[in-house]
Image (cartoon, rainbow, N blue to C red):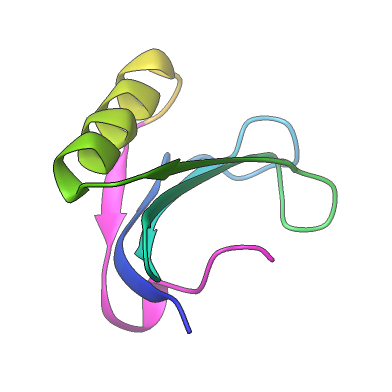
Amino acid sequence: MEDVAGRWWNGIWGRLARRDVWLTREVRWKVIARAGDSETGQVLRWEFDTETEARAMVERLLAADAGGTWRQQTGDAASPPPR
């Protein structure tokens, strides 16, 4: 079972412009990024040994896509990442 340590969304609706980023941990830290919506979006995944390395990747992803206003999602809004 994965633990979701953080989730971000760029605040833009739509199949092509929406971006989501999750930070999860099972045994290793994982960063999962989706470009597009949940039905047709492209999903990329990275694994890291430390939380510091994983959070650095999250920061790079957020900085690389300045197309929206990134906001961290918490509570019920922090849905699980795509499988």
Residue 75, given in percent of the width and then of the height, sits at 28, 81
Furthest residue toward left: 52
Number of marks in picture: 0
Q: Which residues are magenta?
A: 69-83
- What secondary structure do most residues of the magenta stretch adopt? loop
Q: Is residue 81 above or below residue 43?
A: below
- Where is residue 41, by image quadrant? top right
Please name whichever residue, 25 or 78, is drawn nearer the observer in this view of the structure: 25
State left or right for residue 15 relative to residue 48: right
Quarter containing the C terminus? bottom right
Q: Is residue 17 above or below residue 81?
A: above
Residue 68, given in percent of the width and then of the height, sits at 41, 28
State left or right for residue 22 relative to residue 62: right
Residue at position x 31%, y 36% in the image:
58
Residue 42, given in percent of the width and then of the height, sits at 75, 38
State left or right for residue 56 relative to residue 22: left
Furthest residue toward right: 40
Residue 73, given in percent of the width and then of the height, sits at 30, 62
Residue at position x 85%, y 47% in the image:
40
> Is 18 a magenta residue?
no
Residue at position x 28%, y 41% in the image:
54
Please name whichever residue, 83 or 36, is drawn nearer the observer in this view of the structure: 83
State left or right for residue 30 relative to residue 13: left
- Where is residue 38, by image quadrant? bottom right
Please name whichever residue, 22 or 29, is drawn nearer the observer in this view of the structure: 29
Residue at position x 31%, y 22% in the image:
60
